[in-house]
Amino acid sequence: MKKKILICGAGGFIGGHLASRFLKENKYDLVCADVKPKEYWFQIFDEAENHSLDLKEYENTSKVTKNVDYIFNFACNMGGMGFIENNKAECMLSVLVNTNLLRSAVKNSCKKYFFSSSACVYNGSKQNQTFISGLKETDAYPADPEDGYGWEKLFSERMCRHFNEDFGIDTRVVRYHNIYGPLGTFDGGREKAPAALCRKIILAKKNNFKEIDVWGDGEQTRSFLYIDDCIQGTLDVFNSNSNEVFNVGSEEQVSINQMIEIIEDIANYKVNKNYQIDKPKGVRGRSSDNSFIQKQIGWKHTHTLKEGLIKTYNWINNQIESGTNISKFSKSTIEK
């Protein structure tokens, strides 16, 4: 018999891409769960058993984990920096999802549990400059994560560790660094910088605008990981024998201004920048150090930022030009 996999947050960005990957491989029976109504799932597949329900409720997690072998938890209330900074309590309530899924995993004797954490767990004092050295996994302590969302992620990481130690659940944890790509949010307030900037430049070109708004001064730096590399890193960690926490991110660090230049080149359209210094902008600099995951597991990203942005730009442009199902990608809620 095939193993049964549950993907929580399957209607979201990363979860939807992972579901697609598993279905193409045709090795598993797939259960997909998400709080959103099914018409707002980024990707939905008839071959899977699909549930629209709130995983903050224990009864629901108990239901969907029954007879499941492996659990992937991508379910959380999240978005770009603007959403995270303005919805701290809502972000922290996602701890209920992880709590109840772990409890249900013990109750239903699930064999392996994957938790999607975030680079927002890292100590803020290590991110006060631009173009910092990549953050190592050990840099999460002493703890000073992003308020709200980062604290929830760090606490949930510890829950996975202790459920492994106390109940024998075989846990895997990764810290994602700014995942982007097609079939994700690009408008509505939850989008992240690559999608937001692609959208702004696409609309500027379409409407002959000469200026776009940029949050902050554009000098803040980040690394961004293309979705295909994210999925491969996720599977490599999941299939490994290690219960350690791993970065899954890119080491190609750029400023927001530099990323705008890349997108301008893709669009063949130049814009002026209206810097909005009062907008949420997060830490000054953040990037991934991948030395630990490369040594322990052998994973490394293969897409350059420009390669990923070309695919992302073209997909968003097609969505805007066609006007098809834009609301699904621009007003989606909750899960990754």
Image (cartoon, helix red, strand yellow):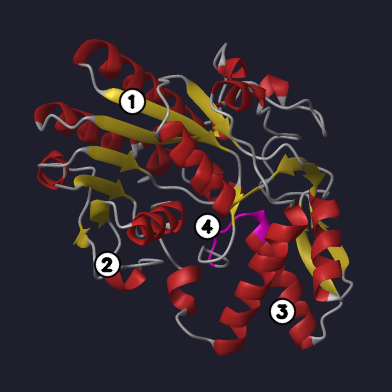
Classify 10 Å Cα crowding around label 4: few (below 14), some (14-19), many (20 and above).
many
Where does the magenta region start and end? 188-194
Closer to the chain start, of discs 4 and 3, is 4
Residue type, label 2: Pro
Q: Nearer the viewer, mark 1 or mark 4?
A: 1
Marks 4 and 3, how far apart at CA: 18 Å
Classify 10 Å Cα crowding around label 2: few (below 14), some (14-19), many (20 and above).
few
Q: Nearer the viewer, mark 1 or mark 3?
A: 1
Closer to the chain start, of discs 4 and 2, is 2
Which numbered marker is on residue 269?
A: none
Q: Eyeballing the image, is 64 above or below 114?
A: below
Tag 1–tag 4 contact (CB < 8 Å): no
- What is the magenta segment's predominant secondary structure? loop
Find disc 3 in the rendering and name its residue: 203
Closer to the chain start, of discs 1 and 4, is 1
Marks 2 and 1, how far apart at CA: 29 Å
Which numbered marker is on residue 171?
A: 1
Tag 4–tag 3 contact (CB < 8 Å): no
Task: Pick the residue in front: 250 or 86.
Answer: 250
Find disc 2 in the rendering and name its residue: 37
Task: Pick the residue in front: 319 or 92.
Answer: 319
- Whether residue 38 is visible to the viewer of this picture, yes or no, is yes
Q: Secondary structure at mark 1?
A: strand
Indicate the quadrant where residue 123 lies. top right
Q: Nearer the viewer, mark 2 or mark 1?
A: 1
Marks 4 and 2, how far apart at CA: 17 Å
Find disc 4 in the rendering and name its residue: 190
Residue type, label 3: Leu
